[in-house]
Image (cartoon, rainbow, N blue to C red):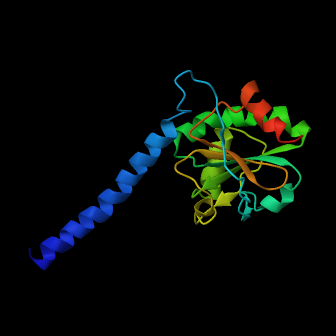
């Protein structure tokens, strides 16, 4: 095989592999709970490792750090504006935020890869009033065990990863919120 043909194959693979990865990630994200009953579920994380710290700014240039929420349970979502299941679950995250903020529980949704203008445009049609820090270079998402978007972690008041949810959820589901509230005790 000549060098130019080999070079063309390498270029073709360089284009195809990222597309295949995105397709696999999208398929994982579309899997809601894996439970045929449709039950909203959070998967416990064994041994509750410490949640990786982050220090990010939101679209209005305000800083957000995980350590700012020490002593609170945190629903930490990773999402992107191009991700249909992420967009679909955002209104329920807002309703969950409204339901639990008085209980000392924070909702934070880290955007992966979108710039401030893209996020602000999204918010014009999908208003939320919980923090949306931006992981512009995807360095923070790489420190968490994220398998696809959306992925949400529930962090206990001691800063440990207690639960994970891969794929979209209806975050205002009472059973799901009861699991989250139980971490406050």
Q: Residue at x 31, y 61 (%)?
A: 15
Judging depth in this view, the residue of 97 and 175 nearest the camera is 175
Dividing the image into 4 quarters, which one contains the C terminus? top right
**Residue shown at 14% from the left, 76% from the top:** 4
Q: Is residue 150 left or right of residue 26?
A: right
Q: Quadrant of the N terminus?
A: bottom left
Query: Outermost residue, top direction?
Result: 37
Q: Residue at x 55, y 28 (%)?
A: 35
Which is nearer the eye, 24 or 43?
43
Of 177 and 5, the residue lying toward us: 177
Query: In the shown orientation, is residue 87 left or right of residue 101?
Result: left
The total of numbered circles placed on residues is 0
Q: Residue furthest bottom?
A: 3
Q: Position of residue 146 (x, y in %)?
A: 57, 53
Instruction: List x then y, in percent, for residue 31.
Output: 50, 35
- Residue furthest to the left: 1
Position in image of residue 69 (x %, y %): 85, 55
Q: Is residue 137 above or below residue 80?
A: below
Instruction: Give the side of residue 57 with respect to residue 86, left or right.
Output: right
Q: Is residue 177 visible?
A: yes
One can see residue 63 in this view: no
Q: Point out residue 115 in the picture as x, y percentages from the top left corner.
A: 60, 58
* Image quadrant where residue 64 sits: bottom right
Q: Residue at x 89, y 52 (%)?
A: 71
């Amino acid at each position: 095989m000549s060098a130019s043909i080999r070079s063309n194959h390498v270029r073709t693979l360089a284009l195809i592999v990222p597309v295949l990865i995105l397709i696999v990630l999208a398929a994982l994200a579309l899997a809601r709970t894996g439970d045929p009953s449709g039950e909203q579920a959070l998967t416990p994380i064994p041994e509750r490792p410490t949640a990786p710290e982050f220090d990010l700014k939101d679209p209005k240039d305000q800083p957000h750090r995980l350590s700012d929420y020490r002593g609170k349970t945190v629903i930490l979502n990773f999402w992107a504006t191009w991700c249909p299941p992420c967009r679909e679950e955002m209104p329920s995250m807002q309703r969950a935020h409204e339901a639990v903020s008085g209980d000392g529980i924070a909702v934070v949704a880290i955007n992966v890869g979108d710039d401030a203008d893209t996020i602000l445009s999204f918010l014009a049609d999908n208003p939320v009033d919980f923090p949306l820090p931006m992981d512009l270079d995807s360095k923070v998402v790489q420190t968490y065990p994220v398998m696809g978007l959306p992925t949400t972690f529930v962090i206990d008041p001691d800063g440990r990863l207690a639960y994970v949810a891969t794929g979209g959820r209806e975050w205002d589901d009472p059973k799901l919120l009861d699991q989250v509230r139980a971490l406050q005790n």
